[in-house]
Amino acid sequence: MKIDSVDFFYLSMPQVTTEADGSQDALLVRVSGGGLSGFGECEAAPLPSIAAFSCPMSHGACRPVAASVLGRRVDSPADIAAIAADVAYYSMDLLQAPHTWSGIEMALWDLLGRARGEPVWKLLGHAQAHPKTPYASLLFGDTPQQTLERGRDALRRGFRAAKFGWGPIGQGTASQDAEHFFAAREALGPDGILLVDVGQVFDEDVARAAERLGALEEAGAVWLEEPFHAHALQAYGELSRQCRNLRLAGGEGAHNAAMAMHLLDYGGVGFLQIDCGRVGGIGPARRLAELAAARGVTYVNHTFTSHLALSASIQPYAGLADHTICEYPAAPKALAVELTRNHLTPGADGLVRLPDSPGLGMEIDPQAVRRYQVDVEIRVGGRLVHATPAW
Amino acid sequence: MKIDSVDFFYLSMPQVTTEADGSQDALLVRVSGGGLSGFGECEAAPLPSIAAFSCPMSHGACRPVAASVLGRRVDSPADIAAIAADVAYYSMDLLQAPHTWSGIEMALWDLLGRARGEPVWKLLGHAQAHPKTPYASLLFGDTPQQTLERGRDALRRGFRAAKFGWGPIGQGTASQDAEHFFAAREALGPDGILLVDVGQVFDEDVARAAERLGALEEAGAVWLEEPFHAHALQAYGELSRQCRNLRLAGGEGAHNAAMAMHLLDYGGVGFLQIDCGRVGGIGPARRLAELAAARGVTYVNHTFTSHLALSASIQPYAGLADHTICEYPAAPKALAVELTRNHLTPGADGLVRLPDSPGLGMEIDPQAVRRYQVDVEIRVGGRLVHATPAW
């Protein structure tokens, strides 16, 4: 089928705050062709991503994303990969392009799956979709007691895995941090899966991060996420060589597969966290899952928005039975909840399963789109290059 | 002084073609404060860069660039670095932000220099600004004879260094390519500085690139630029270990200092090419020049637009006497020529010198701005977030 149109729906909560909650707005992408529509979602910054689709060309290696997408035929996964290669080459100097393209790419997989009547994970070559263990994403408390209570609450809500993040970690002494790690372990019990995310707090300071390793190992943390900024490959490499059972985790910021691979090649991470809404969509995520598995590295999705994005982000590693941990937006904003009519709700066993229905298996609620839609109009040289699409 | 306003002027040639010529449009940035104005230029894709400045916040780590800039005080280089750190942190999930910020950062140095009555290279701690040897950027001809003629023409125009790029290289056999390398050397004579740029044509294929090394060494090429895509660090590393006198060159795509350093740490490049309009501006470029020099790597500017951008791109390594090669836009479009009233024209000795005048030392021509200005209007939720500024 031919790609007839690509529409961007900018959705937002009435009020967006400075909290680090990525579910406060969304850029929903609808790709239409062959009488069908597929849906995807770009990660963050709707306006620049819309602009990267519709902007005038700057030169041959800085064309808008639209130039490589509109009018193209999509009849197989190879067609999606061919468009991806064109976007990478012809939009080489357009920095925002990978975020824009990621949402379109998801929508193309959804469209192709609907056209063929098959779930995306089958199109990706997975024999089956294994259930995943969702983890609750929590913030460390201001005190170890608060951390303990938050962990116990997650357990009561049925989670067997919890990630504690940010909060006071790295702000005080290593022994103050250790009390939080032990409180988190106490909350989850000996069998709970404990994950720790310190939100780049150590920048590039390996020594300060290393001071925390002993307590993290003793508390049985499975991973330490983003000790350093996303490009600090040397620091990642040095710290990873000091780990015993603990492994480093990172990768959410990668906006192409090569950047993610650097964290394996040079950073020594043991968990590769990929955001399908940034890395270029489902295709590169699938290849990364395979490459990670071949290297003994565990693949994990990074998802902080709707269940459309959640479904897209689990598809790439659905068939990897041993890669069981899954990020699960534990308390998203109403927009992200209401965007889809169906949800990937954990089963009685606490596990999350992908739908067997065609494409990404998620049904968009047009009422929710209308409810949260933000009007966008962009004129360049008197020409309307973007207007709010009709549903 | 306080940053009162940041204005973006989107300039474009009446017609933009698919040729790989970055001087077909420009995003001029004017920063005003303390009754003065400074100017900078963002590299490529004006519309997404404008959107990244003015977009609504998505969440705490995805704020518009404006949020970290407007109203801030700038009285010293440290103030510029502090704003840069805020942009990096608070716009972490806004991919386009570094390109937007780069033009603002240049303008802040220009502003600070004008306020202090000092050229930027002095503010950067350079004792003097050494002249640079400009190289002419040429395309390989369709035939070796054409390559020869183009090289001779550059010599006649006074260039002692020439970079031949793209064209048929990598499309045919290694021995066909060799004929071009030898023709280029013949044109430049034994003392001419020969540089070769193959525009990522080998993607990640080290073996195909390595087949060309012998002829490049024999032709006395100083560098081989971008044999692989910008993130192929492994391939860069493998190829660099096979070089004798030739060195690899790369880095123009880096949108932060860490990415550029990876090409040294893992890619083994001998020439680091930095575009101030992408890497975050003059400050990070200055640090990279120092780091490169300490590692025996030669710093080179990457510039393909106006002489405002050219001045900004030479400032970071002005004081490094041994880092002499300088990219010089040899045949820019009228827009890029007319944008500034003065130009960094090579002297009788063929060398390019930075102005001693305050800031970046370039004078913008308001008539040229009006002549090429493109009207841009962006409305989000009925609110005008960007309108074409008045001069």
Image: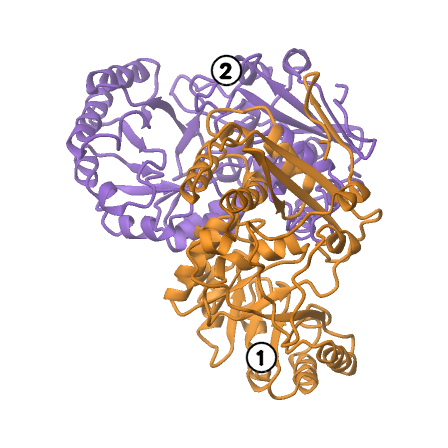
Chain colours: A orange, B purple
User: How far across and down, in percent of the image, does residue A21 sit?
Assistant: 73, 57
Say few, some or many: other residues with alpha carbon within 10 Å of mark 2 (under 14 / 14 to 19 / 20 or more).
some
User: How far across and down, in percent of the image, does residue A385 sit?
Assistant: 66, 24
Say few, some or many: other residues with alpha carbon within 10 Å of mark 1 (under 14 / 14 to 19 / 20 or more).
many
In the image, residue A118 above or below residue A298: above
Q: Label 2, on which residue?
A: B333
- Foreground residue among B165 and A356: A356
Farthest residue, direction front: A117
**Residue at horizontal 15%, vertical 32%?**
B175
Label annotation for residue A235:
none
Q: Are marks 2 and 1 in contact (CB under 8 Å)?
A: no
The N terminus of chain B - image quarter: top right
Task: Specify whether residue B260 is in view.
Answer: yes
- Foreground residue among B309 and A361: A361
Label annotation for residue A221:
1
In the image, residue B147 above or below residue A246: above
Element on which disc 2 rests: loop
Of all chains, the one bearing label 2 is B
Q: Nearer the viewer, mark 2 or mark 1?
A: 1
In the image, residue B231 above or below residue A247: above
Toward which corner of the image does residue B200 lie, by quadrant? top left
- Foreground residue among A182 and A50: A50
